[in-house]
Image: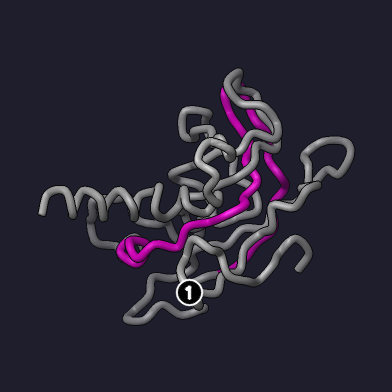
């Protein structure tokens, strides 16, 4: 589909193939120039019994939401797929909230601010969010995201979901305590 590329992210290691939205030089904007009106979501449809299969998911198109006061609409650029997500698919109590049937699956993302009604974020800012939808766009409170400076370390944006994100922090704490 338009806006997607398949290839290797240099931060994932040799031979690992990914499919992600391209952060192209002219990204889709939420404004009068190229306004998107539909949000494509991946919905958690059924709890898996054993292996996770495509039958556990569904898709739906919903109207693109308007940010309220203190909210930010974020366009997904990269989406994390962590092993911890398998536990969130079960109904059992866990350290993290489980996914809700009939609702979008949740993940960490790196995205671009498409629209903002929060003073700390402007359209075009790159951000990291902890509990965002498996969707083209997520509407979140401003306190749920943090700004990313893409030039600060000269690293790919996807690193914020791996080495600089939760998996990297988990590994660092494990090594530091070992």
Name the image quarter holding the C terminus: bottom left
Measured as percent of width and height from the top left, residue 73 is found at 64, 37
Asked whether residue 65 is drawn in magenta, I would say yes
Who's the residue at 61% across and 32% down the image?
72
Q: Residue furthest top?
A: 119
50 w.r.t. 104: above or below: below
Measured as percent of width and height from the top left, residue 145 is found at 49, 35
Q: Residue furthest left?
A: 178
Who's the residue at 50% across and 47% down the image?
132
Name the image quarter holding the N terminus: bottom right
24 or 113, which lies in front? 24
SS at mark 1 in the image: loop
Give the mark count: 1
Q: Which residues are magenta?
A: 58-87
Answer left or right for 103 relative to 172.
right
20 or 93, which lies in front? 20
Q: Residue furthest right?
A: 33
Answer left or right for 84 relative to 75.
left
43 or 33, which lies in front? 33
Measured as percent of width and height from the top left, residue 166 is found at 35, 50
Colour scheme shown: one colour
Q: Which residue in the structure is indicated by mark 1?
A: 14
Who's the residue at 45% across and 52% down the image?
161
Answer left or right for 144 relative to 34.
left
Who's the residue at 62% across and 71% down the image?
7
Label 1, residues with CA under 10 Å away: few <14, some 14-19, many ≥20 = few
17 w.r.t. 63: above or below: below
């Amino acid at each position: 589909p338009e806006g997607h590329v398949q290839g290797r992210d240099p931060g994932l290691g040799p031979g690992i193939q990914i499919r992600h939205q391209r952060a192209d030089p002219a990204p889709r904007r939420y404004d009068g120039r190229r306004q998107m009106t539909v949000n494509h979501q991946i919905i958690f449809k059924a709890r898996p019994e054993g292996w996770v299969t495509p039958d556990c998911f569904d898709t739906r198109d919903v109207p693109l939401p308007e940010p309220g006061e203190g909210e930010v609409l974020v366009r997904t650029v990269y989406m994390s797929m962590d092993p911890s997500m398998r536990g969130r698919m079960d109904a059992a109590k866990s350290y993290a909230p489980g996914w809700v049937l009939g609702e979008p699956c949740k993940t960490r993302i790196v995205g671009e601010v498409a629209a903002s009604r929060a003073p700390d974020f402007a359209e075009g800012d790159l951000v990291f969010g902890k509990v965002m939808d498996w969707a083209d766009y997520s509407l979140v409170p401003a306190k749920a995201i943090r700004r990313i400076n893409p030039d600060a370390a000269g690293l790919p944006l996807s690193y914020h979901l791996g080495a600089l994100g939760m998996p990297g922090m988990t590994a660092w704490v494990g090594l530091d305590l070992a």
